[in-house]
Amino acid sequence: MKNLKYKDIEAFVFRLWQREVSEEKISQKETELLDQWKIHVEKSLDKNHMKESAERVLFSLESYFIQPPIINHPNGFRKYVYQIAAVIILLFSIGGIFTYHTFFKPDVYVAKSGNEKVYLADGSVVTLFPGAELTVKKSFPADTRVVDLKGDAIFSVAKSKKHPFIVQADGFSTKVLGTVFKITQAGNDKAVDLYEGKVAVSYAGVPVTFLKPHQKWTNFGVSRTAAIISFKKENKSKKEFPSLLSLSFNDVTLKEVTEVLQKNYNINIIYPKEVADKKITADFTGGNTDENVEALAFILGLEVQKEKQIYILKKQP
């Protein structure tokens, strides 16, 4: 590395610092020197480690430094001190940036146009769909394996009974020990499709939901709403047909509740306009269409009149 053409140590260190900040490509020789520094830097950094690291780099750079003569120059010593002080400041500046990028700055993966596979340190594989973004902290994997997701992705998680894998998405999280599942986020619509294993889905305002293979968790695009849909294959056609296993609402407006019921049961519900914004908390798990609409009317203090696939909720006479 002695063929580097730098007149003094300040120019060398400043150039490294300048390139790190501007994200300009660092030369191979400079990279070698930074790698030497990195080898000596422990993960549990403190002031003593930083000081020792800076001293090692300073020692490595001494060959580039032309010491200013201090004999017969009354201000020479002061000038030398100023130069060393400037070097130390620059060393700590580049040290802070280098340390942050090496040990603390999260790794961000983005699928810009097509699908992109991300191979994580624990053996898990994430397939990002176009536009999706995965953020992985430098501490991964730890006692708890945590990643952040924007957009849609399929996760094939390496099995570990002791170290849960958690995907933090927009407003909800999915916790697993080892499985294959898909997370979908489209505006307010959130969904988790489970293919293998078992997952727990946490969503604000509703109980934690546990999924089995071939089941899907969704909020139907409504806050504080949770549902489980099961997909069963028909023997003859081998097509998967959805079946609503559970449905719960926690402080959700009647308007939003009826929209979900109408969509899933293929019915039409008519109710007085003045109760459209009334908040409903109910669990419709296990009931059929008639029973669930009757339960909704009971909560509102209304009666039900049915005409084919139309349910009319009206005040009791």
Image: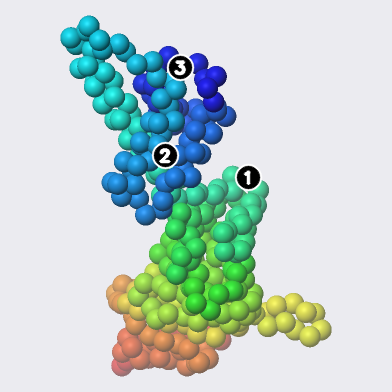
Mark 2: which secondary structure? helix
Q: Tag count in the figure?
A: 3
Asked if residue 67 lies left or right of residue 109, the reply is left
The residue located at (38%, 41%) in the rendering is 53
Residue at numbered disc 1: 113
Residue at numbered disc 3: 6
Q: Quadrant of the C terminus?
A: bottom left
The residue located at (24%, 22%) in the rendering is 81
The answer to whether residue 63 is above or below residue 267 is: above
Asked if residue 151 lies left or right of residue 67, the reply is right
**Residue 3: % across, % down:** 55, 19
Q: Residue furthest top?
A: 72
**Residue 316: % across, % down:** 32, 91
Query: Foreground mark, 3 or 1?
Result: 3
Res. 85 visible in picture: yes
Q: Earlier in the sequence, mark 3 or mark 1?
A: 3
Residue at numbered disc 2: 98
Q: Earlier in the sequence, mark 2 or mark 3?
A: 3
State the separation of the CA atoms marked 2 and 1.
Answer: 31 Å
